[in-house]
Image (cartoon, rainbow, N blue to C red):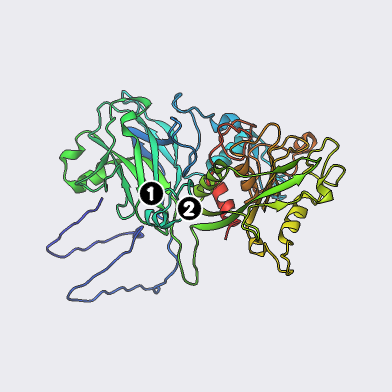
Amino acid sequence: MSRTRIVGGKITEIVGGEYNIYSEGPITLTSLEGSVNITARQGITHGNPGTAPTVSKITTECIVEFRTKQDGSYTGQFGFDWLREDDNGLTTEAKYYDCLENGYEAPNGRAPHRDVNTEYESKDEAFKALQKEYNKIPIDIIPRPATVPFTKDYFVPYLNLFPKPYSDAATVPTGMPKPPFEAELRTLVEVGGTDEPDQIRIVFDKRYFEINGKDGSDANPVLISDKALGAKREATADTIKIKCIEGFTTKQEIKVFVYPKGTLAKPVAEQIFARKLAGEIIVLPNKNTTGQNAVKNIKEQKFVFINVKTNINGSIKIGSSKLIDKINLQNALYQSLVFGYFEEYSDSNGINLFDLSTDSDFKNGGRYIDTNGNMNQDKSTFHSRIKHLFLSLKDTNGSPINSKYRDYFTFFMFDVDSYDGAPGQVESVAIKNVVVFEGANGRWPTTCVHEGLHGMGLYHSHDDRSTAAIANHTAIQMNKKFVYTKFKTDNLMSYNTRSRKTTWQWQWEIIKSNTK
């Protein structure tokens, strides 16, 4: 929302203390007939922009929160990270406080808190650290009927979307999703006070977004229709669809304001001061910059899927990938603004086939085969040996065949079982080399994405240390950050194989740090 003030004469402001101006966009000073004079007794300095101070507490009659849809339409197509909390039964996912167990705390080793281990001392301490991953707005909510307000912390969710022009220009294989430039979210509304507000309005920068097909201007506002007094509920008629129409290099805020009763009868300038913050979404930067201090907010990663031929015990087996393997991996990358280039391997004959059927290490009695005729992927050098053999292939002239894949993330697809039934395994965390098995139990649609994200630097969301290590409070990995009960979250790094589909904002940073 813009504001214009026209003054026919002179304006003089006298300020006894500091005078600060903050703007998300450019600040322009124009003098049509005179000059612009800036003087200072102690000189004029230039520097990098700071951050506007946050309001310490807001008193409001209304809270609006946003969640992903639960009707099955959201399968992880875009990144949306919110702190799971009690939603009065409106959300099916477990509250994070209930399933959080611990997390990584950097040891300080200094008095008076000589903390030399690498985990928090209590669940409460870990949860406070988790809360700090989100922007927090303390809010005094006026209950219905209005009495003494009670305090609630509003934790602002993160959203990642690609700009529509980037998505339109992207080329993807048949059946693969394009980069998402839209997000559809549920709206949860709680309205207190004694009177229904005049309106609840979503405010955003129309240069970058449209919501529900509107630009959010005064002539075309985006309103939430459910403004009746009452406890938190889903505003079923107020699902919002956010479209990113242009890219931006600084984080953007989509805010919700409540206009108390009688506000709209006032002049527009007074409405701005009377409205109260009711909700917010942070949309992270999605445009690359150039120059000396260039920043890549969108990154790219190449993948190759390789069908492996084996003959362990006289039976020829050829592995293959499935479209869903790649769709789920691509969606997970999109959550962190990473575009994946997916290729099917092509040998010198134009065939996707890597032949290990004559290699004695992969036959009964071989180095990597157990006594039951299954692959033992836990043998040392298993992963690295496969990749070395692949990259070392030469044609009849002695020229390397697969050198172009040296910098690719490799997926070797086997149609055999592993010795322990594991459907896949990464060589190591942050090493971009995965083997996938299609054994008696098959594999999960999320096996490739789970192992792929290991290769991009992510650890499990649960604690898989030994009992002794847990008891001794040792070796929680820094990139693990937080530890949850196994199977309890829908994070892709959990073992909740049937419903895992999301990643967290702090994981997005790790993924991007391991991507060019």
What residue is shown with label 2?
Answer: 172
Q: Is residue 429 left or right of residue 235?
A: right
SS of the residue at dot 1? strand
Q: Is residue 297 left or right of residue 456?
A: left
Pick the front one: 41 or 162: 162
Residue drawn at x 78%, y 44% is 311
Circle 2 residues within 10 Å: few <14, some 14–19, many ≥20: some
Mark 2: amino acid: Val
Inter-mark Cα distance, 2 to 1: 30 Å
Residue drawn at x 62%, y 43% is 448
User: How many numbered marks have been drawn onto this rendered protein structure?
Assistant: 2
- Look at the picture and state if 87 lies above or below 33: above
Kindly identify which numbered label has been placed on residue 253. 1
Q: Is residue 219 left or right of residue 513?
A: left
| Visible residue check, residue 107 | no
Pick the front one: 422 or 173: 173
Kindly identify which numbered label has been placed on residue 74. none
Mark 1: amino acid: Glu
